[in-house]
Image: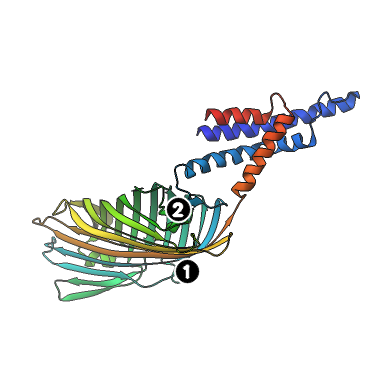
Amino acid sequence: MKRLLIIVSCINCFLATVAGQETTVKEQQVTGQQPVTELSASAQSQTKSGTLLFFYRLGRTIETALMKGIDSTYLELYDRSWRFALTATGNGVYNTINMSDMPSNSNVNIDLRSSPSIGLGFSAAWHSIQFNYSWDVMFRRSRKFDFAILNRAWGIEFTHHVNTNIYGRLDVQNDMTYDINYGDLEIATTFLSMYFIFNSDEYSTSSALRQSYRQKKSAGSFYLQAQYLGTNITSTGDPLTYTMNSLKSTEIHQAAVSAGYGYNYTPNNGKFLLHISAAPMAIVFNRTILTFYYPLTIDNEKFDITLQQVIDPKHWLYITGTARVAFSWDINEWCYFAGNAQFYNMRFNSKKTETLALKINTWEWNANITFGARFGISRKKMKTILEQYDEDRKNNPRKDDILDWVDKKISKH
């Protein structure tokens, strides 16, 4: 918020300064007086570019922080900080739900899976900050949004995926079978991941996954990771809800920690990069919430009754795992081609009560292919601009200069 106030104040002050100079010049022309002070053409140009130079300096400060402590033999920032890319995505889900001892004394088994589909989207990024959005162009049954802040030593990834590209089969008491068609169920997944890398001076996960650093020499590192996964499986139609003994939705909340190893291999100074990482995962928090929906009609009036039941896990700890592979290829200074895929498994097994026993097993994979372009002012050119401005300010000292005010603000914040 402080930086935002600085930027707004900088713009207002700059506009007021320019407006004041124009008014003074007009008054002097009317009275026939000569301007008291004349700025050089270079000084006028630099004054008009004050706000832009402020952002240059801010960008240089952030880039300096991003490069602090890295081993330049292994890692470096790309020269151009902005990236825009077109992406093609794909994902797959296989899910099994087994419920027994329901209120109707029946057993229900549900097998769900998604059919192959292709999504198209775009991503935009500045250094290690990136967001992506994609949607299913084949069937229009899914959409995905993710946001990431990936530093060299740590990272945060957020993903939200809504998918109705699901079909399967529902068995009741092993003698009645119902087909689950596309659109009958909606699966919404929210994924939050945070990680810390030990050997961050030589190794960067974001160099392979987000293309923000160049991995110049092969290196690897152990890492720690904490994850949250929330899944909501919702029936979109009353017939299916009735078939599943009025079960309207199943919410699954899980938290996990993992310790793994990642390796970046590059044979040609970072022009091509291959990444692989894997980690065993311990699910330390596991909770499921079932929502039952009962439509009632009393005296020709319709009522909707919703009941929720919280299901506690049978065990407080589950061991599973996750793996990731990725590649990136710098076609030239401006363009790159990359891809990555991730696989993980989540499980839930409830305590058996008098009314319910529940088992859930989910396998999911996500993959994307990216063609991107880098743009923006190169760090070398930005450095030259700032050096030229500093030299001009030495040769043309001016009091109450808007840029002097900006420099004071930058030094304070």
Query: Closer to the camera: disc 2 or disc 1?
Result: 2
Residue 206 in the image: above or below residue 142: above
Figure disc tally: 2
Circle 1 Cα neighbour tier, 10 Å, few/some/many (<14 / 14–19 / ≥20) = some
Q: Residue furthest right?
A: 32
In 3D space, how far apart are the residues under numbered discs 2 and 1 (Cα atoms)? 40 Å
Q: Left or right of 319: which side holds 227?
A: right
> Residue 371 at what x, y percent from top left?
52, 64
At x 30%, y 57%, the residue is 232
Q: Secondary structure at mark 1?
A: loop
Q: Left or right of 312: which side holds 34?
A: right
Q: Left or right of 103: which side holds 51?
A: right
Residue 73 in the image: above or below residue 345: above
Circle 2 Cα neighbour tier, 10 Å, few/some/many (<14 / 14–19 / ≥20) = some
Q: How is the image coloured?
A: rainbow
Marked residue nearer the N-terminal end (2 or 1): 2
Q: Amino acid at mark 1?
A: Val
At x 79%, y 31%, the residue is 39
Q: Nearer the viewer, residue 354 or 127?
A: 127
Q: Badge 2 is on which residue?
A: 74
What is the number of the mark on residue 137?
1
Q: Amino acid at mark 2?
A: Tyr
Q: Nearer the viewer, residue 162 or 381?
A: 381
Q: Secondary structure at mark 2?
A: loop
> Residue 50 at what x, y percent from top left?
67, 36
What is the number of the mark on residue 359?
none
At x 72%, y 27%, the residue is 397
> Residue 349 at what x, y percent from top left?
16, 58
